[in-house]
Every structure is written in structure tokens, then in C-alpha cells.
Image (cartoon, coloured by chain):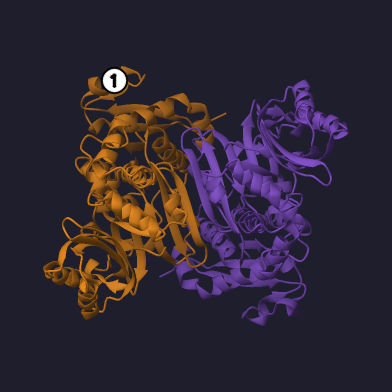
Chain colours: A purple, B orange
Amino acid sequence: MHKKRPVNIGLLGIGTIGTGVARGLVARSQILARQAGCLLVLKAVVEKDVSRHGLAGLDRAIFTDDYRRVVYGAEIDIVIELIGGEYPAFDYIKEALSNGKHVVTANKEVMAKHGTELLSIAKEHHAGLRFEASVGGGIPLISPFQRDLVANDIQAIYAIVNGTTNYILTRMAHDKLDFNLALKHAQKLGYAEANPANDIGGLDAAYKLAILTSLGFDMDVNFDEIFYEGISRLKPQDFSYAEEFGYAIKLLAIAKRSDNLVEARVQPVLIPAESLLAKVDGVYNAIYVSGDLVGNILFYGQGAGPSATSSAVLADVINIAQNISAGRDNAPRFIPEKKSGIKPMSEIQTRYYFRMKVQDKAGVLARIASVMGDQAISISSVKQQESDASTNTAEIVIMTHPARESAVQDAIKVINKLPVVKEISNFIRVEAI
Amino acid sequence: MHKKRPVNIGLLGIGTIGTGVARGLVARSQILARQAGCLLVLKAVVEKDVSRHGLAGLDRAIFTDDYRRVVYGAEIDIVIELIGGEYPAFDYIKEALSNGKHVVTANKEVMAKHGTELLSIAKEHHAGLRFEASVGGGIPLISPFQRDLVANDIQAIYAIVNGTTNYILTRMAHDKLDFNLALKHAQKLGYAEANPANDIGGLDAAYKLAILTSLGFDMDVNFDEIFYEGISRLKPQDFSYAEEFGYAIKLLAIAKRSDNLVEARVQPVLIPAESLLAKVDGVYNAIYVSGDLVGNILFYGQGAGPSATSSAVLADVINIAQNISAGRDNAPRFIPEKKSGIKPMSEIQTRYYFRMKVQDKAGVLARIASVMGDQAISISSVKQQESDASTNTAEIVIMTHPARESAVQDAIKVINKLPVVKEISNFIRVEAI
């Protein structure tokens, strides 16, 4: 049936995801062969410490601790990189591509920081470089941007791309848990790592945003220009107030056209409760894209896990193998041409939510409004919570009209010094979507 | 910049969608050229009656009323078919492919009825045949099935693929409108045609389901085996009861694996109110896909309109042009191999909702339950509405456990003859999703 020669695969890293991919390659070899037009053979697996992960049911003979057996192995056609992290993964990918190997990777950090460079190297050596699994697990995203949405001028991307934080926010919103308890639940269920810093701090989402921004806006993104912050400063009362105002709170990766630049930032934001993104709960991911032709579309699904990630990795492998067996070039069609043009955070304009503790006496709101007015920040609505009589403290929540970030930061400094203000407990940006 | 020769396009049909596509080709020629790697030139437009639609700002010289100028035109590389309907569109596509032209079409009826045949002809003549716009407007769907989900064994597809009916159902559910009034609103807003039969009767959704089933289950679907019904028998009280039971009512195109066959049917169904599909309101489309690796994913967006449809048509054109300019084959990689294996409607098993008018006296429910029991249909819950004293009539709603369609049809016949039953007002299938 398959007269073409087999396509040989080398796997770098056999942790959770790698094991899933390796099992998929072996267990569904017939389906994959029909799709690829040739047999896909897992020839070598590189792992420093096989005993740690076990052999995943594979022949011990294909294991090696020498990455060069894959990256330089004469018989290897496709290198699957599932080590994760920037180094040595970046070096291995670079060497593999320079050596004419096709590469499939799920590595968001490497693609966020070195994507354009690697795509250029791939093109130069007529090698394929696919990274569908780097954002949104198995949800088709990279390929839709590269193929299906190419006639569009993309206006905006709003994305829930970190399942850990979305799970925590869902528990905080629905069950009124505080952040630490919600995080503990997430860890217990395996949705958060023992060290969850990269997830809850927004870094993981920022990597994915860099990749989406590069694709959506055809831009060589400088990762360091992407602003990100996490969710640990959110309190249960922020969710209650948000709900009262008709909003949900989500950690969004946002990229949108703004003047001749692109805003690219990861932040917890208030979004309208009736929006579809607000209804994305638990560990799920959802990516909302606004294009000038297509209008608003949304992609939703599991953003992580060995099975969903395998779906994307194996699709990339099949796609490359199809081209190999048909004698077609796998080189990337597209290297972003434009230099990074990310708008500095201080220049963005958006609406804001403030929660403050103030002295419970007349004229306080007038003082705050006056400071805001000096910075051209106009208030759209205010809610004052019943005061704590023992400490003579009231809590007020202020929603503003669109204002400039730098003006808001200046106002915060002044408000913090007002004798009538005990603290600015939180401020959160608001997106209309 | 573009050293490659231009790719020449012929357009069949310049109605609403055709005008949108023609305008897109002209207005964004620079963007498209960068994406395609060569200029895309609209060389000829075939329209019987140009005066009806105007010239869409195009040079009059490219218009012709002779389809052969496009289908046989030596200079034409890509034929875009936007005539719609089965004939003569099918013949034109067939002739174009047989003549080695690449074809891009948005024609759901032709692809539903003749997809496999046309793909085979395309393959034979090394011609491309793309139809991303035939389902879900600009939402990437065909391409994800053909590329991104290929490693999966697809378990089920649940799709809202008809915006007209989804708008009507949304108005019926949220504003308690009856069907006729909701339809009038839809017509007034341009969401329903003057003759809305194909939309409200489920035929439009059935065409799209045939295409999705063929892609998802790699099957040469016989369109005549697809069961479909429309939404006109739904009443406002069905929505009220559904809500009380925790459900929404949606017209779903359903394809799912069932034993060694595939269920493929278009029906109004009750789905859990908390499911994401239940929250898809208005003219929007959403396609939910369950795969063994990827889990559950959802695609959402505008399913119709000249702009969204252009997004898909132009992407297909660009994709073909990229291959032409790179010297790559455009022939379809995939022709469904398996013969159609659609499960007969009478053999499906699902849960059911019944609404009946019965005599308001003791023992009625016992009689109905006994008839159902004879057919091995077990009742999961019952709601009895306060009776209409003047006519001595009560309304009862019954939800069943999973039962076989043929048994339910038999039970309906018997129940209809029970003296205590005045009418079975409605019965609707229930999907857990």
C-alpha cells in the first residue's frame, strides 16, 4: 500500500508529552501511514535519564543519551523536540535545521524568543519547522493563522492560553476561593506545577502571545517588549465587584492593532460577562481573533496535556512526511518581515477598575475624582461598600472611561499620598472585546 | 518583488458573495500577492445578467456571459465558482477540473452531493479543489480537518451551521417569540431569505453535515442517507420546558461514531444549558469536534456573509497560488476511501423529550408509562403543568432515558391512540454532548 520509503523520526525528550507522542507514533502507525502517505518510524529517542521516565513500551535499542544521534543521524528525517525550556533545546533545533533536518517542536519559549531566526535557518536549508503544539495544545491555531486567515488584516487577538490560571480564576469566581486555596486545588488536581511561578506570573502566556502576535501581525516580535503580569494580586472581592458591574475576570493574552503599532500584553482583565471568552471555564483555552474579513472567530479546547499536545505534534509530523513523500519542499513559506513594533505599556489606552480603602467621610470621592481629572481620567461609575465602623473605613470601587496608562500610573502615585486614602487595594484593566 | 508569473483567476457568478470576493481580489492585491508569492489577477467574470448585479467596480471588459471563457480559457489558472446550487455549477466545476483548472468553491450542495467524485477528478488531472467556504463561512474548518486533526480518530461532530435558524431559535428562547414572528424578524434583518425553506427545513445544514461527515470520518457520504428536519414545529413552551429542565434547544448537525457506523442527522435537539454550544446565539455558527487525542474543541464565528465567506475563498486561492508559484502539485491529498456507512435513523439511540396534552385525571401517566415500558423506553423525569379546567386538559412533559428511535416511533403510534391522550404536541431528541 505504501510504496514510498518510510520517514524516520528522532525524538528529543521523553517526558510526559514525549511519551504521549511516542505512544501515538507506535500505536496508530497504520492511521498515520495512511495520512502521511508513507510509514513513520520512530528510530531514536534521546533522553539523559531513561530510568526516570521508563521506556514507554519502546524498544530499548532506540534509546540513546547522545542528542547527536538524532540531530546529526544520517537516517533521521524529522526531529521532534519535546525537551522544553530555552537551552539546550534552542541549540538542538538550530543544529538540526542547519543540518537539513525537519523539526517539529512544542517549545513555546524557544519559538517566542527565537522563532524568526529559526524560521530563517529552516528556509535557508529547505527544512520544515512546525510548532502547532506550542500554543493551545491541540487546538488548531498556528496553521489557521498561516493558511486560513491569510487574506485578513488581523485587528485583535484575545486569548486564554494558560489553563492553570484559568482554572484558578474559575474557582475564585465561582466558589469564592482565595488565590492560595484555588492554587492548592489546582496543584492537587495536577493543573498546576509544584513551582507554578511561570504560569501564575503570566510568563507562560506571554511566550504564547509572542508567537500569536508574530503570526497575526506578521512581525518579528522582540519578546522583551511584551508586558506581562500574573493573577496573584486578585482577591475574591474583585470577582464580586466585577460580577456586580457585569464583568468576569480572565487572564488574557492581548494583541491588537493600535495606531501603527501593536499592543501585546498579558494581564488579568475585566471582560463583559456575556462575552463567550468569559464563559470559558476551568483548564480550557480559547483564542478569539478579529479579522477585517472573517469578523470575530473563536477557537476553544484543551490547551495542554500529553494527548491534546500529541494531536498537534503528530499532525505536524504527518504534514512534513506528506511533503517528503510527495517530493515537496517543507521550507517555511513565511518569515516575518516587519521589525517588532510593540506599543510601550505606558502608552496604551483602556478602561480601569480601581478598588480602594478610604476614610469614611464626606468629600473623599471628590478628592479622588479631582486627582483623576487632573490626569484626564474620567470616572464612569462608582460603587461604595458599607463602611467598617470600627476603623472608619469604606471601600469604593471606581470604573473609568478610557484613559492612558501613564496618566493612570501618575494618578495612582498622587492618590496613594492622599491622607483620605488608606490604600489602593487593586486596579485592573477593562477590555470591551 | 514578485518575479513569478501572475496567477490568473476566472470567477463564475458575481452575486453578493462573488462581488465580495472580486472586491477583495482587487482592493487587497498587495497583501494577497505577498501571501501568494505572486500577483493574483482577476481575468474574467462570468455572469448571465451583469445589469442585475452591477460591475462591482470592475473593468467591463473582463465580463462575459460565456462560462467557457473561464472554464476553458487558456490563460485561466484558478476558477472560483460562486454560482451556488447543484446545476450548472456541478458541470462547470467538473469541466474545469477535467481541463486541469484549479477550482475554489463555496458550493455546499455540490460538495455534499458530488464531493468525492469531484475530488477524484481533481486528483486525476493534478488540479486543486478547495471548498473551505462551503461550511461555516470564514471559520477555518475544512483545513483543520484535512491538516490539523488528521492524527485523531474523530468521535463526534456537533455543529450549529445554519445562522438563520440559530437566530430564530435564539429569539424564540430569549424573547419568547413564536416561530413565525421570529422568522419575520430574521427576514427583516436579512438573516432569512424571502423563501427560507432550505434553511428552516434543515436542508442547508444537511449539506454542510454531509461535508463535515465526509471529512471527519473519511467517508464517501451518500447524501440521501442523511436524515434532516427543521425547526418549524417548535413552540415557545418547548423552550420554557427545556429551560426548566436545564436545557437549550438548538438545530444541530450531528455526526458521531455509533457501533461500526456513523450517525449523521440534522435535528432540533435539547442540549445542556451549560454547554458552550448552548451559549452560541444569533446568526453565529459553532462546530464542536470530539477527537480521541485532541479532546473536545470548538470553532466559532460568522457562518455566512460576503465578507466572512471571502476570507475563506481568498485563503483557498492564495494557497493554490502558493503551490503554483512554488511548482508544487495542488491535487487533493485525500479522497474518502470508505463507502458511506450512515446508521439508519430508526436505529439510533438517544434520550427524548415529549410534550403531550392529556385528560386531567388520575392514572393517565401510568397508562403512558406502561406503553413506553412495553417498548423498553424508561422515563427519567416528568413535569405536569397546571390543567386547563375548562377543557379538563393537562400538559405533561416527559424526559426519557436513552431509547431506540424505532421503539419511540412505535410508542408514539400507540400513545396517539390512547383515549386519555389528546395529542402528542411535540417530541424532541436530547443530546448530552
> Does A414 sit left or right of B245 as displayed?
right
Using a 10 Å C-alpha cutoff, classify the residue at mark 1 as few (fewer than 14 neighbours), some (14 to 19) or many (20 or more): few
**Residue at x-position 41% and y-position 35%:** B310
How many marks are shown on the rendered structure?
1
**Residue B99 rendering spot, x and y as whole percentages:** 28, 42
A276, B103: nearer the viewer: A276
Please say if B9 is above or below A272: above
**Drawn side of residue B37 relative to residue B362, left or right:** right
Residue at the image point whose x is 27% and y is 65% from the top: B340
Amino acid type indicated by mark 1? Gly
- Report in which chain the residue with disc 1 lies: B
Name the image quarter holding the N terminus of chain A. Answer: bottom left
**Quadrant of the image occupied by residue B261:** bottom left
Horizontal and vertical percent for residue A3? Answer: 44, 68
Residue closest to the eye, B24 or A247: A247
Whether residue B354 is visible, yes or no, is no
> Residue B31 at what x, y percent from top left?
52, 30
Q: Is residue A235 left or right of residue B49?
A: right
Is A317 in front, or is B399? B399
The residue indicated by pointer 1 is B54
Q: Quadrant of the C terminus of chain A?
A: top right
- From the viewer's perspective, tell me whether residue B119 is left or right of residue A315: left
In this rendering, does residue B423 appear at all?
A: yes
Where residue A189 appears, as percent x and y from the top left, is: 66, 69
- Which element is circle 1 on? loop
B242 up-or-down from B399: above or below: above
Nearer to us in this view, B300 or A386 = A386
